[in-house]
Amino acid sequence: MTPALLLLLLAQDAAAWKALGVKWAQQANYREAEEPFRRACELDPKLPDACYFWARVLYALDRFEPSLAALKKLPPEPRTVLAMAQAEEALGRARDAEAHFKQAGDPVKYGLFLFRQGRLPEAESVLDRDPRSAEQWWHLGRVRYQLGKLPAARAALERSLSLDPNQEPVRLLLAKIKAREP
């Protein structure tokens, strides 16, 4: 097979383009990954992850509008909706971002969005709904600390550490709280 024929075949092979994009993305070379993912998505939009990876690379390159445009072509799966929320937030569209964070169904991500928006009581409410993960307890502790609810913050942080004892930021905030307690 001649190199020209090989290039022609590659040019029409969405899976090969996606694999090339993955190679570059694994090396955190998102500029090089963008073109292969774009080609893979355009050649076969139904190829698993091709369009999603393209959108996420665009996001990593701070190209939020094109990322959002690519995401809008995908089925509204939770990770796609979450990626849309992140792009909307990056664009400063808090109302649209919030709607997508809610739709994504991830209380940690939604709670953190509310935290970043300075809406601490709402963040506490979202994060306090059936917390199951060390991460959720950690962020609940952070919110409660910011609200001045030190005993509740301490309890949340201790619960986070009981689920995952290898969290240095949690230990640091817990030490800060203990130093402020009488």
Image (spheres, rainbow, N blue to C red):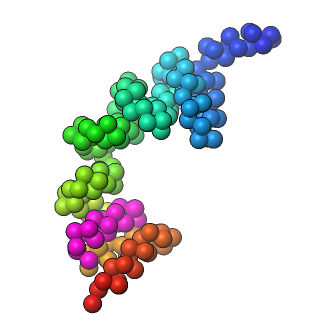
In this picture, residue 149 sits left or right of residue 171: left
| Between 34 and 72, the one nearer to me in the picture | 34
**Which quadrant of the structure image shows residue 7?**
top right
Which image quadrant: the N terminus? top right
Residue 81 visible to the viewer: no
x, y percentage for residue 3?
A: 78, 13
Q: Is residue 78 magenta?
A: no
**Which quadrant of the structure image shows residue 176?**
bottom left
| Between 134 and 88, the one nearer to me in the picture | 88
In this picture, residue 37 sits left or right of residue 94: right
x, y percentage for residue 5?
A: 74, 9
- Span shown in magenta: 132-150
Relative to 107, does residue 52 appear above or below in the rendering?
above
Residue sitting at x 27%, y 56%: 115
x, y percentage for residue 68?
A: 37, 30
Residue sitting at x 67%, y 17%: 10
Which image quadrant: the C terminus? bottom left
Relative to 3, does residue 66 appear above or below in the rendering?
below
Q: From the image, give the main secondary structure of the stretch colored magenta.
A: helix
